[in-house]
Image: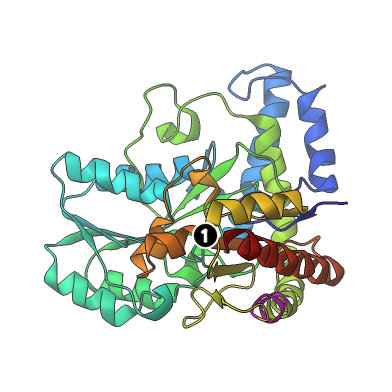
């Protein structure tokens, strides 16, 4: 039985064209981009061409793109680095990625004020809630909210959030990782002062990400070292991964409109099939959502048994964020949305990709229905 991969929110297969772009920098072009000789200059040229590709998608000048090892580092560099250069509070939400929440905890432990904005039905954070939080908190230095929730797919009205933040004199940082490839993620569209993206969510390699900064905005570096990335992210550049990121981000943006249209149809089909199983409900359905995610709760099953049985049935999905892999704890996002620990643990995230077909969606839904029936019969 062939496995059906529906965990594209965790990672995506490496695109063939991206691999081809990377290969020369895994073999023949081996120089350090900081070296002045010919091999170093060739590597440096490749890094800067990749930076130009990312900058074009993000609507910024190349020098505004800071390459990192991935989105977790970009999130940390944004939250800790921007707060390190400014006085005031951090305003975020309990629904954010662990990279932002753990960075917020670190700030709190250091004595910085951290506040959390209330969310509405399904987990959406609207401008009125943000404005209320901005008014009640001490002077806010930074608002940090994600564009597309990595577990439920709930979509942020980033422009409204950005405008409200600016009106209050705060910077707005948007984790745009899950929106890249299906949503418009330029800094202008987001009305953001900084945004994080990742290569491996859009057919690129793991180990490459970027923090994109607005004009004139700099961050306090997390690492001590050389002058790479204008001193904001020292360390030898991962040339093959950066080249792959440039190619993947450019290709994903070029295909964005068509992919969004096709994914919306698959998402609707998958939700209809899954909710045809008694006791299944879609999490976040009360709010606007992106087109990649379908997060469901399943009544009357043990969550761990369900995931194991789905894996045995060749349906590759997750219980939530891949960053929580190995954890027996229920999703912090679903708990914040008011789910009981049992219901949160009995939840499954399906996430679609550019390779996902209608036939795979139908087959996965059929296998899911059989698995749920077996799990319930065993529990009974």
The answer to which image quadrant residue 355 occupies is bottom right
**Residue 120 highlighted magenta (yes or no):** no
Residue 56 in view (yes/no) = yes
Q: Where is residue 47? Give x, y as percent.
A: 65, 36
Q: Is residue 209 left or right of residue 218?
A: right
Tell me the residue at 46%/40% (across/down): 73
Q: Quadrant of the C terminus?
A: bottom right
Residue drawn 48% across the image and 57% down it: 345
Is 271 in the magenta?
yes
Instruction: Assign the magenta stretch its main secondary structure.
Output: helix
Q: Which element is circle 1 on?
A: loop
Quadrant of the image occupied by residue 45: top right
Camera-side residue of 357 and 306: 306
Residue 63 visible? The answer is no
Task: Note whether 242 is above or below 30 in the view shown.
Answer: below
Picture coordinates of residue 124, whole percent (x, y): 40, 75
**Residue at 11% over, 62% down:** 138
Q: Is 210 placed above or below 36 here? A: below
Q: Residue at x 65, y 49 (%)?
A: 308
Can you give x and y, in whole percent of width and height, for residue 39 in the image?
73, 19
Q: Which residues are magenta?
A: 270-275
In the rendered view, tell whether residue 287 sits above or below residue 225: below
Within 10 Å of disc 1 (Cα), the crowding (few <14, some 14-19, many 20+) is: many
What residue is pinned by disc 1? Answer: 150
């Amino acid at each position: 039985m062939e496995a059906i991969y529906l965990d594209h929110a965790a990672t995506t297969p490496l695109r063939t064209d991206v691999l081809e772009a990377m290969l020369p920098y895994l073999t023949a072009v081996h120089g350090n981009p900081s070296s002045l000789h010919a091999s170093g200059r060739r590597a440096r040229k490749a890094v800067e061409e990749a930076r130009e590709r990312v900058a074009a998608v993000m609507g910024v000048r190349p020098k505004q793109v800071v390459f990192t090892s991935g989105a977790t580092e970009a999130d940390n560099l944004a939250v800790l680095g921007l707060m390190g250069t400014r006085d005031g509070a951090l305003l975020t939400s309990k629904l954010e990625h662990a990279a932002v929440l753990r960075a917020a905890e670190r700030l709190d432990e250091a004595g910085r004020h951290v506040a959390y904005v209330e969310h509405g039905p399904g987990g959406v954070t609207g401008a009125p809630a943000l404005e209320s939080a901005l008014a009640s908190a001490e002077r806010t230095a930074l608002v940090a909210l994600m564009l597309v929730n990595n577990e439920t797919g709930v979509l942020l009205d980033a422009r409204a959030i950005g405008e409200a933040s600016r009106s209050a004199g705060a910077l707005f940082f948007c984790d745009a990782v899950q929106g890249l490839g299906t949503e418009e993620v330029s800094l202008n569209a987001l009305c953001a002062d900084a945004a994080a993206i990742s290569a491996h969510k859009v057919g690129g390699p793991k180990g490459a990400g970027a923090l994109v900064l607005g004009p004139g905005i700099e961050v306090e570096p997390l690492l001590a070292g050389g002058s790479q990335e204008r001193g904001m992210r020292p360390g030898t550049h991962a040339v093959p991964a950066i080249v792959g990121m440039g190619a993947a981000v450019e290709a994903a943006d070029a295909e964005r409109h068509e992919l969004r249209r096709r994914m919306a149809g698959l998402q609707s089909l998958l939700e209809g099939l899954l909710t045809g199983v008694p006791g299944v409900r879609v999490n976040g359905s009360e709010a606007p959502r992106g087109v990649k995610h379908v997060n469901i709760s399943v009544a009357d099953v043990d969550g761990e048994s369900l995931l194991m049985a789905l894996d045995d049935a060749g349906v590759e999905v997750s219980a939530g964020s891949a960053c929580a892999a190995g954890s027996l704890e229920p999703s912090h996002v679903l708990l914040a949305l008011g789910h009981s620990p049992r219901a949160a643990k009995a939840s499954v995230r399906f996430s679609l990709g550019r390779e996902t077909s209608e036939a795979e969606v139908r087959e996965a839904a059929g296998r899911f229905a059989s698995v749920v029936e077996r799990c319930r019969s065993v529990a009974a």
